[in-house]
Amino acid sequence: MDVSLLISLAEITIAGAIINASVHFVPVGGAPAAMATSTGVGTGTTQLAAGAGFTGLMAAAAMASKVGIGGLGFLLILLSGAVGSMIMLGVTMLIGQLIYVFGVGVVPAADKCEIDPITKDPQKPYVTPGTTGHGIPTVCFISGLIGAALGGLGGALAYIALMNLGFTPAVAGMLAVGFFFINAVLASYNIGGTIEGFHDPKFKKMPNGVIASLVASLICGIVAVAMVL
Amino acid sequence: MSHGGGGHATEIYPENQVFAVGVVLSLIGIYAAHFLSDYGLSMLIGGLLVSSACVAGANTVRKVAAYGLGTGVPSIGMISLGMGTLAAVAGVLIPKAFGISYLVAPILTLIIALVVGFIVGNLTVKPVGMKIPIMVRSMTYLSVAGALALLGFTTAYVGSLEPTTFVKGALESGVMALAFIAAGMAILHPFNACLGPNESHKRTLTLAIACGLISWFVFSVVKLDIVSIVVSIILWAIVYVKFVKMSLNDACAVLHVPEIPKKEE
Amino acid sequence: MDTTLIALGALALSGALATVAGCAEDLESDVGSQSNPNSQVQLAPQMGNIHRYFNKAISGEPVSYGLYVAVAGAVAYAIMQMGLNPILALTLGAGVAAFVHGAYAISAYLGRIVGQSKNFGQPVYWDIVMSHIGPIVGHGFIAVFCMVLMAYLANTILGNPFPLPLIALIFGITVGAIGSSTGDVHYGAEREYQKYPFGGGVPVANHGDIDVKAEYGLRNGMDSSYFCSRLGGVLTGICFGLIVFLDGWRGIIGDILQGGNVISASIISIVVGLIIIALLAIANRKVEVFARNKYGPYTK
């Protein structure tokens, strides 16, 4: 068994775990957030993670076709994927914030913490009674950026691993899309609906999801390696 | 976004029966698509038979989502198609790596989908902790349905199971991306659209057949096969109109004017 | 012509197309009431509010838009293989996608109204179906056409190695995720609850108590779209346009500043990206502080 095959297998497994972890960082309020009833972006966990991750995947693919996947190129592709994903989620969260503040008239406030860990602002007085927070306070924004970076990184790493196995960009891209969805949905099931970011108590469940993804990605990696033997 | 848990009406056909029929018909469809391509019939016969995989998948989603999936029905469609993509591509490419004939591709896809679906299904129970009793079985069924639908539509488009032709025709062209999302939507939409306390198996199945047929129609357009386009759109229209009529019949009232019905006190 | 110049032009066009696509996608999801705010429309009959919204429950926007744009991309690809003009191919592709969109939309309305709200006396309003399906499919066509044209530009000029249908799928998922996160909030938190005073979130106790009466007559999806086109639609368009433009622009800046050396160009593009992200975080903080100072805490 070729060493490079084992390295690709390891890369795919780790990529899956990173993708799973990334979904836990993104502040998603689900259906209630669209009615300003809970903090975070108003969409589903899988969907937002997929949107950010695929933007990262596209950035990584464009970079890979320019610099190749060896040496420094490896690092550049990972960073490119992360940055592309962060821009997408950052702009989305900022525009969402604008709509919350100017369109709906709420103050960004988190419900799962008394004081914002980053800005040290009190949150409780600004939460509308009867809701569990609204908008995107700074801690959620930063948490989202971290999540996007990891998601883009994971997607790019999976893409590089598949390219190293010898697939063409089109095949690698398609397999990366399917692979990303498997891990993102596993994370979404682990979260069980909504999460505010790394300060949310639900965040402590992350190890369960990561372990599940490690196993699932290992299986996927073995299947992928079997395709090129 | 939708949530399951809208109650679970009685079934007309048992889930295992629908699943078995779907699997058998799709396998026949895939082989037909491969062998009949010289006569130009691969999309016509293959596409029609493969739609049954979408129906089988939609039926399984109906059963598992009724327990309340918590994060919505779309996720389960996407994970089943994610596993299906891996199984389908692996089924086509692995025979070459081990020197077996490529004609075992559909069977190999079936086996890989079964194994991956079973493992991932177990992972969702432990350590992820989903509390749905039939989760493992449903994930396995959905993985198989997704894989066969994906492999079926792409084989019907390409007309051959031979690895290099398949990779060039389905993956390099990107048609597999369409198969991914079209099969995914056909599997998750029927129950998602019909769920609720008054959900009926008959209506959901009719919509599932309509969604499978419209996916076949889209692939016929992509293949530019005129006969297949005409046949698929006629069949789709028949089933869809049946669904609309059934719904209008089952509704509590059908109004055509902007009038809110008065509530009886 | 200079390749950088062509790439810059294609990128500017992509940014403009993204803005139109984002706006059209959001307005379409407002006419048809899709995704998360639709949960309120579904809840309304249970709360005693018989409504005249188009209850379009097609999964979430990312998945459904992924479908339409992928259909358009694959059909366009097939027609271009025949040798026809790309613009014609993209238009025909978007047309087929619009047809699929219409089929899914009507089946979603019928399925949900009959399956979920029948017991609470919610009738099927056939005139709503017939009057709304036009704008739904029309806005969808505009959004899908812009996206698939963007995918075509990315595939041919901007150097993306993926095939057209795959890029189309990814763009569709992205526009759906963005529209669902930004514009839908304006619809869900503001327009659906227009009768409640401005400011503040919607408490859980008020869920389902959506507007049934409009400014004149009964509320339907077209009113929502009209209102949300003032803010929600515009900001969604700007959001997507900014994302597409900024992501491509940082790459081109790298090429312009260090054209010969691919490695340093890439490093510059990453650094520019990080600067942009820092600016976004600062802007978010400024908006948050503005809101805290201007609106103030709840006093009671």
Image: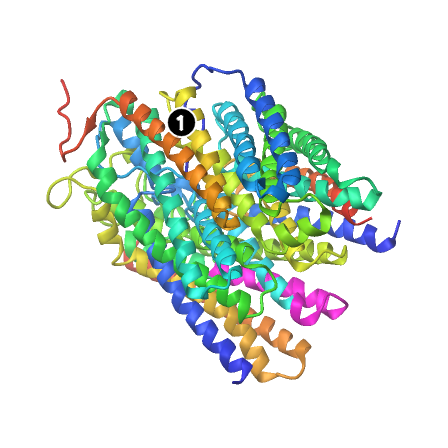
Q: Residue C25 lies in magenta, yes or no?
A: no
Is residue C116 something that shows in the picture? Answer: yes
Query: Is A79 left or right of B182, judged from the image as shown?
Result: right
- Based on the displayed image, in which of its 4 quarters is residue C284 positioned? bottom left
Q: Is residue C22 left or right of residue A62?
A: left
In depth, the one of C264 and B157 nearer the eye is B157
Question: By what rule are the colours in the image chosen?
Answer: rainbow
Decide: is A47 above or below C241: above
Which image quadrant for residue B109? top right
Residue C96 place in picture, x, y as percent: 40, 50
Chain of the residue displaying label 1: B
User: Where is C172 relative to B210, above or below?
Assistant: below
Q: How many marks?
A: 1
Most common SS among magenta residues: helix
Q: Residue at x 45, y 28 (%)?
A: B4
Q: Secondary structure at mark 1?
A: loop
Residue C279 in view, yes or no? no
A134 vs C130, nearest the viewer: C130
Q: State the residue at coordinates (58%, 59%).
A: C163
Q: Which residue is mark 1?
A: B195
Q: Position of residue A205 (x, y in %)?
A: 61, 38
Q: Position of residue A74 (x, y in %)?
A: 72, 65
Check disc 1 and give the amino acid type: Leu
Location of the N terminus of chain B by quadrant is top left
Q: Which residues are magenta?
A: A64-90
Q: In this picture, is C289 found above or below B175?
A: below
Percent position of residue A81, x then y: 61, 61
Residue C181 lies left or right of residue C204; in this view the side is: right
Where C180 falls versus B137 (above or below)? Answer: below
The residue that appears at 35% across and 28% down in the rendered structure is B243
Indicate the quadrant containing the C terminus of chain B: top left, top right, bottom left or bottom right. top left
